[in-house]
Amino acid sequence: MKVISVIPSWNCSATLAEVVKEVKDKVDSIVLVDDGSTDQTREIAKLLTVDYLRHPINRGQGAALKTGTIYALSQDADVIVHFDADGQFRAEDIPALVNPIIKGEAEIVFGSRFLDDTTKMPAFKKKVIMPLAHFINRVFFNIKMSDPQSGFRAFSRRAAKQLDWQQDRMAHCSEILVAAHASKLPIVEVPITVLYPDFGQKLGGGFKILYDMFIAKLNS
């Protein structure tokens, strides 16, 4: 099976080369979507072994992932992996993410930070934001997953063609989760480790998760 990773990047030049280096050994090819970056992303991309796509303006992560997913399908991808360029995800978790699809056990796989204790999540996010996110998923969407909003995910070709999210910016994450469950395609979660640097401690990112989930509800 041909596995392609879609990596959206907006001003992630500091981590981009290392992320691509780690991911390239785990997949067959990489689609890098430069979402209107104003740093050195374009110059760095020229030195990397990737298919490089660029939005002339910043449209948002959801839009970048959609652009990359459509392109990956055009390149005959059998499995598509969404991976971030900021260094929070670990490339070594990719095989566990794609294996259920390769084995025919699932069409959609979400990475979960809550199936083991390897992710050291900021306390406020772990004790306040995530319990609220779980509550919203259960009450409004009837979704009972260990991780209420995971951006590290893999789709089979069939699933990638079927899931047509509309949110360009961060609300896409909740929208994809809701659409995945509405599709009735088999879904599994696998444990992943997410690394939280200093910027992962900011409260605004946690509240944005809840905002995105309400936006997804309004559009469901």
Image (cartoon, helix red, strand yellow):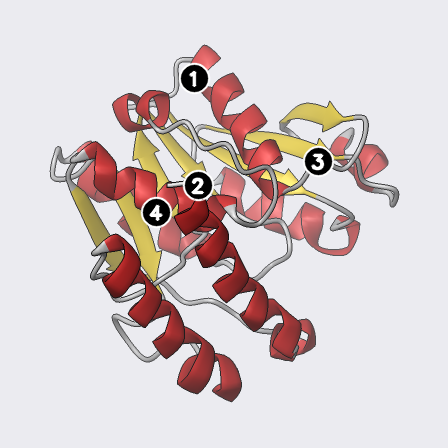
Q: In the rendered view of the protein, which quadrant contains the N terminus?
A: top left
Which is nearer the N-term, disc 3 or disc 4? 3
Which is nearer the N-term, disc 2 or disc 3? 3
Given residues 137 and 72, the one toward you in this image is 137
Q: Where does label 1 land, which residue?
A: 73
Label 2 or label 3, whichever lies nearer to me, is: 2
Q: Label 2, secondary structure: give it.
A: loop
Label 2 or label 1, whichever lies nearer to me, is: 2
> Which x, y percent locates residue 220?
37, 41
Q: Are marks 2 and 3 in contact (CB under 8 Å)?
A: no
| Residue 75 seen in render | no
Residue 100 left/right relative to 209 = left
> Which x, y percent locates residue 40?
86, 43
Q: Are marks 2 and 1 in contact (CB under 8 Å)?
A: no
Q: Label 4, secondary structure: give it.
A: helix
Q: Which mark is residue 219?
A: 2
Q: Where does label 3 land, which residue?
A: 59
Q: Amino acid at mark 4?
A: Leu
Which is nearer the N-term, disc 4 or disc 1? 1
Q: Label 1, secondary structure: give it.
A: helix
C-alpha span from label 2 to label 1:
25 Å
C-alpha span from label 4 to label 1:
20 Å
Which is nearer the N-term, disc 1 or disc 3? 3
Q: Amino acid at mark 2?
A: Asn
Q: Residue at x 70, y 35 (%)?
A: 59
Q: Which mark is residue 177?
A: 4
Q: Residue at x 25, y 64 (%)?
A: 139
